[in-house]
């Protein structure tokens, strides 16, 4: 039962079957494009997203960085949600390494509205950094793990394209979004030029992300991956985990969503303020009174329930492949007990 | 066995009755005619106890005068001299009744009657041998399911078919037929000198909709769950109601939405239309047009097309159920919920009443409650006061501890007010099932006062 680790869906450990797939992986030197397992993973990711090609990268941050650097040149602008992961949590890499200028947009609803895209597509003028790229995030981490439907995204992505922009999805958890909306991931990727999705979050692999796009785009992205130090050698060992994840762990994401819904339901029934969003996935955000919040994570950790400390009274719980329904229920009970004891 | 009266003969008779009644001065008239036939078998500890076959036929005539007096009479024959007597009786009853200015006949409906899949040819093909084999199998399954089964008090099967006609002087006429089949098992379990009797039954329009093996196993499972039940300490508990217990509660709730009860001040929901009276988790719908529904029909007892009526939408009262009289009183259209026998004037009733399912499995509900009482049966539901909402009910079931079922519970009572309880139901299961014409799923009631030891 314990520990019940709800810090993130990045904390998952590879299952025995996944480790076996890794141990038995056929490998080669991927910098020479000679790793057969990596090649199979890339082919599968491309097929699943309906794109021509895909590239295996060590992390989602590198996947987004390589995508932005491939789409934009120095001094060009990328429209980013002010709450987006790329803007907040990826070290400012696009500016530091690519000289790409972030054009921030309101994404407080989880989606950058078309008007915000228009606002950032300013006329050609020596004073303005020209917008070249729109980045959207789905599911949206800071907006409670909100899943957007393809239909909800379409007006925004159409607006970007009508203004000559390329569109990239930070789809670290795009399979969660597709699961929530019961749609095919290709309905999302048909709207955009590139997508990055993570193998190491809800899908349960220990490492790795995929960047998918046109053949020409991926060729250039491969060059950028090398430049930022992401070229790996016998990476089939970790690609095998990714392949296993894509083949076995997508169908069960609905369980994670159900577990998160149960956590939310129990915390809410226990009197805590749980954030609601129109299409939740595997995240629960809730608020606790300050007196209960500052060390709540430490007291719960002492009882085997792990999550990050509150930020402004706001606490995030994330369900994943290593949290069962019973564990989710027990975690909620312990959190409620600790809140009421404070 | 009696033959089904020819449809032509019934239509000819009903046309005669309407015409004859009008020619004798009635302002309006309508005719309902029903025919039913069925057979059943019940075994007691594997031995046939009841083996019956029967038919029923009746034709009822309602006459109305210009002041709204209504007279009803019925006979069980299509012979012309009986029909002539029927006209006289109905007119006599009409003249001696009190005027009702809101008595109405439905205007002619133009809708084509929908096919609600109410008739299954396979039901007509059931043989005595089939009945016996099903009953024997249910008896054997129940007998062997648990060593504590000391008697399979009944293993029963029944099936039947029927036809219903309606005609009025307003030109409304229609006919539909349907079948039904049902099976059930009741058992007695004993353990350490303690005995418990219980059972389970199911019914369906279609033969394929029944699972007698499951019914037998369920009868034993449910009875075993409450065998040797004891009190828990008096206190406040979260309750998880299983689907059947929830259905019995939904039945009670349905009565509160009948316009007849609203007008008679027999419902605490009177005056609450559009208001929030329950938790957002609760939504109720009455659907007379449900395919294969046990309470479905293309038109109601007044010839009005049946409909789907949301009654409670996320805790807010959204409609009442109407027949023509109460619809006229409220200035709305009838919802097609007139109930009617061949010997009575129309009233209002539910058709297929459903609690809309939520997202949780029954196991999820247990986990979320953590500790409480799992209720499989209410005792004394008829004692709920529909005006005040007050209740005191016996419950049977099991304790819930650590999110799992524990020991049997019985002899406890819960008390409170339905008005409050409706707002404490915050979780609804996804295990939707019809119990007769009532559809329900497991649900959670919070913080209910329960008296025990």
Image (cartoon, coloured by chain):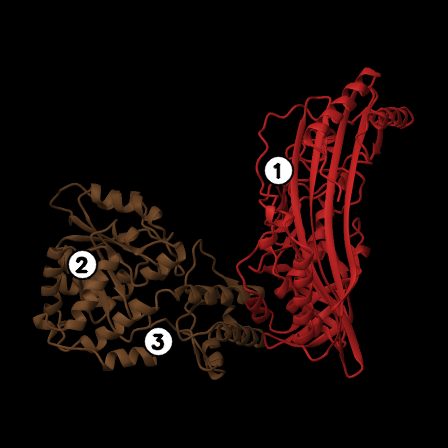
Chain colours: A brown, B red
* SS label for mark 1: loop
**How many neighbours does mark 2 have within 10 angstroms: few (below 14), some (14-19), or many (20 or more)?**
many
Q: Are marks 1 and 2 on the same chain?
A: no
Q: Nearer the viewer, mark 1 or mark 2?
A: 1
Q: Are marks 1 and 3 on the same chain?
A: no
- Residue A36 lies, in percent from the top left, at 15, 72
- Residue B425 lies, in percent from the top left, at 64, 59
* SS label for mark 3: loop
Identify the residue position indicated by label 2 in the image: A68
Disc 1/disc 3 C-alpha distance (Å): 52 Å
**Marks 1,2: beta carbons within 8 A:** no
Give me the chain letter of mark 2: A
Residue appearing at x 77%, y 35% in the figure: B346
**How many neighbours does mark 3 have within 10 angstroms: few (below 14), some (14-19), or many (20 or more)?**
some
Identify the residue position indicated by label 1 in the image: B307
Q: Is residue A91 visible?
A: no
Q: Is residue A155 left or right of residue B137?
A: left
Identify the residue position indicated by label 3 in the image: A11
Front position in the image: A253 or B146? B146
Disc 1/disc 2 C-alpha distance (Å): 56 Å
- Residue A191 lies, in percent from the top left, at 26, 49
Q: Nearer the viewer, mark 1 or mark 3?
A: 1
Front position in the image: B295 or A223? B295
Q: Is residue A269 left or right of residue A94?
A: right
Q: Is residue A244 left or right of residue A334?
A: left
Q: Is residue B114 visible?
A: yes
Give me the chain letter of mark 3: A
């Amino acid at each position: 039962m314990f520990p019940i680790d709800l810090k993130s869906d990045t904390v998952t450990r590879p299952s025995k079957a996944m480790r076996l797939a890794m141990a038995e992986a056929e490998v080669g030197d991927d910098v020479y494009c000679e790793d057969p397992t990596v090649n199979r993973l890339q082919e599968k990711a491309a097929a699943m997203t309906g794109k021509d090609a895909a590239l295996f990268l060590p992390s989602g941050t590198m996947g987004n960085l390589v995508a932005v650097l491939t789409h934009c040149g120095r001094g060009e602008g990328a429209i980013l949600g002010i709450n987006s992961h790329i803007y907040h949590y990826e070290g400012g890499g696009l500016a530091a390494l690519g000289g790409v200028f972030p054009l921030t947009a309101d994404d407080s609803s989880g989606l950058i509205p078309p008007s915000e895209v228009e606002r950032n597509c300013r006329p050609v003028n020596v004073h303005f950094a020209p917008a070249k790229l729109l980045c959207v995030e789905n599911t949206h981490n800071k907006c409670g793990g909100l899943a957007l439907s393809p239909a909800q995204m379409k007006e925004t992505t159409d607006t970007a394209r009508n203004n000559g922009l390329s569109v990239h999805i930070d789809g670290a958890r795009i399979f969660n979004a597709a699961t929530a909306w019961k749609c095919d991931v290709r309905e999302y990727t048909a709207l955009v030029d590139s997508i990055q999705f993570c193998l190491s979050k809800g899908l349960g692999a220990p490492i790795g992300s995929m960047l998918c796009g046109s053949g020409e785009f991926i060729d250039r992205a491969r060059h950028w991956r090398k430049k930022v130090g992401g070229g790996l050698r016998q990476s089939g060992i970790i690609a095998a985990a990714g392949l296993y994840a894509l083949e076995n762990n997508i169908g069960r994401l609905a369980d994670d969503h159900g577990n998160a819904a149960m956590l939310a339901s129990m915390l809410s029934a226990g009197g805590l303020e749980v954030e609601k969003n129109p299409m939740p996935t595997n995240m629960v955000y809730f608020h606790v009174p300050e007196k209960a919040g500052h060390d709540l994570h430490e007291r719960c950790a002492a009882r085997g329930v792990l999550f990050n400390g509150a930020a402004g009274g706001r606490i995030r719980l994330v369900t994943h492949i290593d949290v069962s329904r019973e564990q989710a229920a027990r975690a909620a009970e312990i959190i409620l007990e600790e809140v009421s004891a404070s | 066995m009696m033959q089904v009266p020819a449809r032509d003969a019934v239509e000819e008779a009903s046309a005669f009755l309407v015409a004859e009644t009008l020619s004798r001065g009635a302002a309006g008239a309508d005719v309902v005619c029903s025919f039913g036939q069925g057979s059943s078998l019940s075994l007691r500890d594997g031995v046939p106890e009841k083996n019956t076959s029967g038919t029923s036929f009746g034709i009822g005539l309602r006459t109305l005068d210009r002041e709204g007096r209504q007279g009803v009479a019925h006979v069980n024959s299509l012979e012309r001299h009986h029909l002539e007597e029927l006209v006289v009786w109905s007119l006599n009853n009409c003249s001696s009744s009190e005027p009702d200015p809101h008595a109405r006949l439905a205007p002619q409906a133009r809708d084509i009657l929908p096919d609600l899949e109410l008739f299954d040819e396979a039901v007509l093909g059931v043989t005595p041998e089939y009945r016996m084999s099903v009953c024997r199998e249910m008896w054997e399954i129940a007998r062997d399911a648990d060593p504590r089964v000391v008697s399979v008090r009944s293993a029963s099967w029944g099936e039947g078919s029927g036809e219903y006609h309606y005609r009025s002087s307003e030109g409304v006429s229609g006919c539909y037929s349907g079948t039904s089949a049902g099976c059930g098992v009741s058992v007695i379990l004993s353990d350490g000198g303690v005995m418990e009797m219980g059972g389970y039954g199911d019914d369906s329009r279609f033969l394929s909709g029944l699972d007698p093996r499951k019914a037998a196993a369920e009868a034993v499972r449910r009875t075993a769950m409450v065998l040797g039940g004891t009190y828990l300490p008096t206190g406040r508990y979260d309750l998880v109601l299983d689907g059947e217990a929830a259905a019995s509660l939904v039945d009670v709730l349905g009565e509160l939405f009948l316009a007849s009860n609203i007008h008679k001040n027999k419902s605490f929901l009177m005056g609450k239309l559009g208001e929030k009276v329950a938790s957002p988790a609760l939504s109720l719908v009455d659907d007379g047009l449900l395919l294969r529904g046990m309470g479905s029909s293309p038109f109601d007892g007044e010839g009005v097309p049946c409909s789907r009526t949301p009654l409670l939408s996320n805790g807010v009262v959204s409609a009442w159920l109407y027949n023509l009289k109460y619809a006229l009183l409220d200035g709305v259209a009838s919802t097609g919920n007139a109930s009617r026998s061949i010997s009575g004037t129309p009233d209002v009733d539910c058709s297929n009443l459903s609690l809309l399912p939520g997202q949780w499995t029954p196991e999820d509900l247990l986990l979320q409650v953590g500790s409480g009482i799992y209720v499989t049966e209410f005792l004394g539901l008829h004692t709920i006061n529909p005006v005040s909402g007050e209740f005191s009910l016996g419950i049977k079931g099991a304790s819930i501890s650590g999110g799992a079922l524990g020991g049997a519970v019985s002899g406890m009572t819960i008390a409170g007010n339905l008005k409050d309880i409706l707002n404490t139901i915050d979780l609804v299961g996804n295990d939707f099932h019809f119990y007769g014409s009532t559809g329900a799923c497991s649900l959670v009631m919070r913080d209910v006062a329960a008296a025990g030891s």
